[in-house]
Image (cartoon, helix red, strand yellow):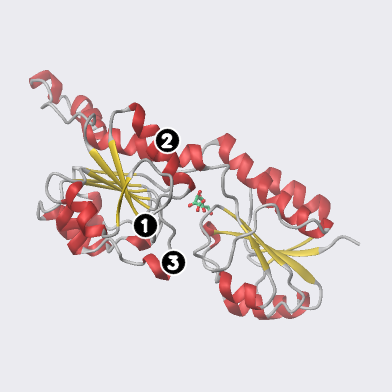
Amino acid sequence: MKPEIVLMGGMMPHVMEALEAAYAVHRYDQAADKAAFLAEVAETARGVVTGGHHGDLDNAVVDALPKLEVISSFGVGVDHIDVGHAAGRGVVVANTPGVLNDEVANLAVALILMCSRQLVAADRYLRSGQWLEGAMPLQQAIRGKTVGILGLGRIGKDIAAKLQVFGCEVVYNGRREQAGQPYRYYADLVAMAKDSDYLVVICPGGPETEGIIDRAVLDALGPEGTLINVARGSVVDEPALVAALAEGRLGGAGLDVFAEEPKVPQALIDLDHVVLLPHVGSATVQTRKAMGDLVVDNLAGHFAGTGALTPVAAD
Ligand code: 8YV
């Protein structure tokens, strides 16, 4: 008998194939009557497969599945899952860390370069015929600039390492100072923002970090500073960001994530000196394939009795 699992939404074709081969798959997203669906699978469902793109996994769903053992989630961020609640129920939560570090770090560096050289505006400059009228104004070098990293985790460290090639000075802020890091630690985020030319957000989302990039941080970053966010929109007070950019209190922004994806405030879209990307940090064929494989491997490890490969630690 194949173990039974619940899918909160569709996954990539190679993931769907692997799951359907190994499990009896029940599609929550395709159920017209969610309560009836949950009642039907309550006594048999042992696994849930989800991802941030499927929205929040409600505790009510977890609680409706008393036989649930494991939640395998696509993506490194688990802010859409109440990990503590799942742990309290004895349910293992697994995510897909590691395999996307390189890609997300590349995108953070790309956003810094896009902002410093105004590359998106430069493209518009050519296409609109402005080049025929004269050269585009000179832009900023990043060599010698200070990049403050909020969240020196696995991806944050990769960003820091890549920035060495560009001659940037890297500093960081996070919950605590990390031993053996070559980068200066700031215990205070506002103080770091004040000393930074670029502030890169790469900390986890969720209640602990909600809105911590607030007006005070943005004002400290200042009119010459640029905010880069490749983490979660929730970390930034978005109305405060829009106001700071519109009023010239903040120099620019490179954003891959937003508060209410895929909705992006029109006021941001209307601004010229921001680069806006549709949450593509990990979005390459190779990385998404590896993330999908890990979703499958985490489940396989759990059901083989050897354990999920990359379980999330509940604090
Ligand atoms: C994914 C991400 O696109 O890994 C993450 O946390 O934000 C992205 O890589 C997203 O999680 C899809 O569910």
Task: From the viewer's perspective, tell me whether residue 16 is left or right of residue 255.
Answer: right
Question: How far separated are the C-alphas under marks 1 and 2?
Answer: 21 Å
Q: Residue sitting at 40 percent across and 44 percent down?
A: 181
Residue 177: quarter of image: bottom left
The residue type indicated by label 2 comes to Asn
Return the residue nearer the eye: 178 or 254.
178
- Residue 259 percent location from the top left of the image: 36, 61
User: Looking at the picture, does residue 34 appear above or below residue 49?
Assistant: below
Mark 2 lies on a secondary structure that is helix
Residue 142: quarter of image: top left
State the residue position of label 2.
Answer: 106
Mark 1 lies on a secondary structure that is loop
Q: Residue sitting at 74 percent across and 81 percent down?
A: 39
Q: Decide: marks 3, 1 in contact (CB < 8 A)?
A: no
Quadrant assignment for the C terminus: bottom right
One can see residue 33 in this view = no
One can see residue 66 in this view = yes
User: Looking at the picture, does residue 98 appear above or below residue 72?
Assistant: above
- Residue 14 percent location from the top left of the image: 70, 43
| Mark 1 beta carbon near ligand 1 (under 8 Å) | no
Residue 190: quarter of image: bottom left
Question: How far separated are the C-alphas under marks 3 and 2?
Answer: 24 Å
Task: From the viewer's perspective, tell me whether residue 68 is left or right of residue 135.
Answer: right
Task: From the viewer's perspective, tell me whether residue 31 is left or right of residue 148.
Answer: right
State the residue position of label 1.
Answer: 174
For marks 3 and 1, give the one nearer the viewer: 1
Question: How far separated are the C-alphas under marks 3 and 1?
Answer: 15 Å
- Residue 252 percent location from the top left of the image: 20, 45
State the residue position of label 3.
Answer: 206
Q: Residue sitting at 57 percent across and 49 percent down?
A: 97
Q: Decide: marks 3, 2 in contact (CB < 8 A)?
A: no
The residue type indicated by label 3 comes to Gly
